[in-house]
Image: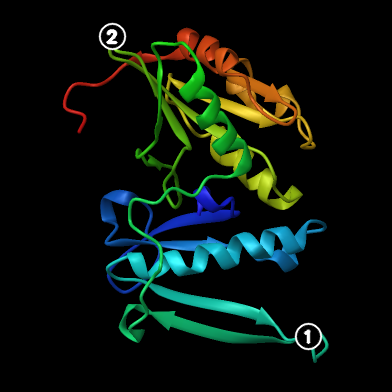
Amino acid sequence: MKLFGLMHRIYPIDQDGTRVASTDLAAGYEVELDGPVSLFRKSQKYGIRMANFLPALPLCDRWEMRAEILDEGSAGDTKQFTLDHTDGLVSHYSTGQRFDSDVERTLTRKWERATTEWDLQREDDVFDLGSEVMIPDFAIEHPDGRRAIMEIIGFWTPEYLTSKLAKIRQIEADNFVLAVSERLDCSDEDFGDSADRVLWFKTGMHVYDVVELAEEYASPVETGRD
């Protein structure tokens, strides 16, 4: 979802699909996506992102999708649409294919041309926030073992931004940093104790600004990390 730039929330669930209080109790995850109708603007662009995401679902071994679709021929009524892994769908995407937002794609390309010892990688850690989880965008690693984790906050609705900020304030990782679009209706005060770890950007980020942030907040990788 993050790679397609979709607004989402992730909840740990048990074998029956019921949400649980911690990832320690999880047998899987429920992902809730906001659709284009929830946006005030750029709904067509967001709808295209969602359409690009859907063919990626069959890449999962087991999955189930339930969509609530607005019926344009009625007064706000919705219809339900369901699919799952038993429907025999095959994705035209490859498992190794990468799908980045414009900001992430541009940063990755800039990084490939930059002269720095720091390595930009897709992050695979999961922050356990109790009834929800959060997967950051990137890890920034140095050959000496230091590592920073970065989340990018760009194009969101006001409601989703409020939810996102609440999650960020729960994260206690010392090496967690943020890159935030100046177009959003928020300020340093909204990030609580993480305010000093925020890199504000307009249309894109400069590699060396990110490196400077990593230099300040990166910490050694824990022993035993895969």
Q: Position of residue 63 (x, y in %)?
A: 35, 71
**186 left or right of 150 in image:** right
Q: Quadrant of residue 201?
A: top right
Left or right: 221 with respect to 37?
A: left
Counting from the top left corner in percent of width and height, residue 108 is at 50, 31
Residue 144 bears which disc, if any?
2
Using the numbered discs, state the Cα–Cα distance from disc 1 to disc 2 in whole angstroms.
Answer: 57 Å
Q: Which residue appears at 68% of the width and 59% of the height? A: 46
Q: Is residue 1 above or below residue 81?
A: above
Res 180 visible: yes
Which residue type carries mark 1?
Glu
Residue appearing at x 54%, y 84% in the figure: 81
Q: Identify the residue position indicated by label 1 in the image.
A: 72
Residue 189 in picture, x, y percent from top left: 72, 24
Question: In this picture, is 184 found above or below 39?
Answer: above
What kind of element bears circle 1? Answer: loop
